Image (cartoon, rainbow, N blue to C red):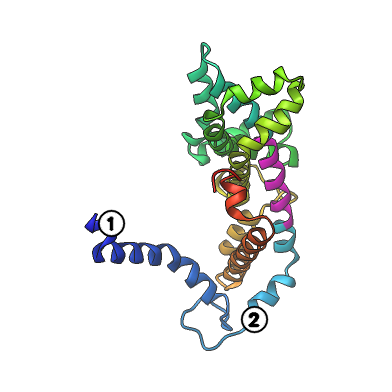
Amino acid sequence: MYLRNGPIGLVFHTLFILFILAPLVMVCAVAFTGDGFISLPSNGLSLRWFKAILNNPRFIDAFIFSLGLGFLSASFAIVLAIPSALAIARFRFPGREALMAFFLSPLMIPHIVLGLAFLKFFTTIGVAGTYFGLVIAHIIVVIPYALRLVLSSATGLDPSLERAALSLGASPWITFRRIVLPLIMPGVVSGWVIAFITSFDELTMSIFIASPSTTTLPVRIFLHIEDTIDPLVTAVSAALIYMTIIAIFILDRLVGLEKLFVGKGRA
């Protein structure tokens, strides 16, 4: 208890938080440099590189593309994860563990191996470098995160609530929409968010299957770093950090993060 709550624990947690936040703070600080190269400290504060983002449509197009790709990938992953999680949580059947391992297998395979495998497979069937192929690959990569979080909510679901609704005349669809879905909603929302973030941030696999017309933001940043060392990428990263903070603040004010991720009855 002393180690957890005493001065040693306080110092440890403070250092740990500083260790986690230090890279983000450094990136945000370097983004305001007026120099033509990455340096800290800089000769003065400037919005030069934030203005450069607006003058570089490739980054803006890649950002919009990544948003749409992440939204589609996370949404399809959740649609697949919900029935899979309910089946795994409710029933005991032959091959259940094998099915679970199959869904989680993308977590066990290095993304560079997945990228090479997708490149070979998509080239064979003629969808290499297409938006369709990129969406399919991202769905496969993010579905383990969605499944695990939905499964955590579905495991504690009381089946008697569904039986009561069915006995009172509710159809299976009404029972799912009004009973099951609200109870597993924290897992669905958190699973969708984690899947979206994973898809948006995916780089290693996307490099192999992306094309000039399907370039995501991480791939665009990587390609830019290969060509130059200017602070434009730090400005892009800082802008993403600021937008994320603003989005979380707005979401908390409009809906409430505890209600969204924990649930009405668990806050």
- Residue at the spot x=46%, y=83% of the render? 41
The one nearer the camera, 185 or 111, is: 185
Residue 3 located left or right of residue 22: left
Q: Which mark is residue 47?
A: 2
Magenta residues span: 64-78
Identity of the residue furthest to the front in this view: 168
| Residue 186 within the magenta-colored segment of the rendering | no
Dominant SS type (magenta): helix
Q: Which mark is residue 4?
A: 1
Residue depth check, mark 2 versus mark 1: number of the one nearer the observer: 1
| Residue 75 within the magenta-colored segment of the rendering | yes
Residue 194 percent location from the top left of the image = 58, 46
Mark 1: few, some, or many residues within 10 Å (few <14, many ≥20)?
few
Specify whether residue 136 is in view: no
Specify whether residue 51 is in view: yes
Residue 233 located left or right of residue 254: left
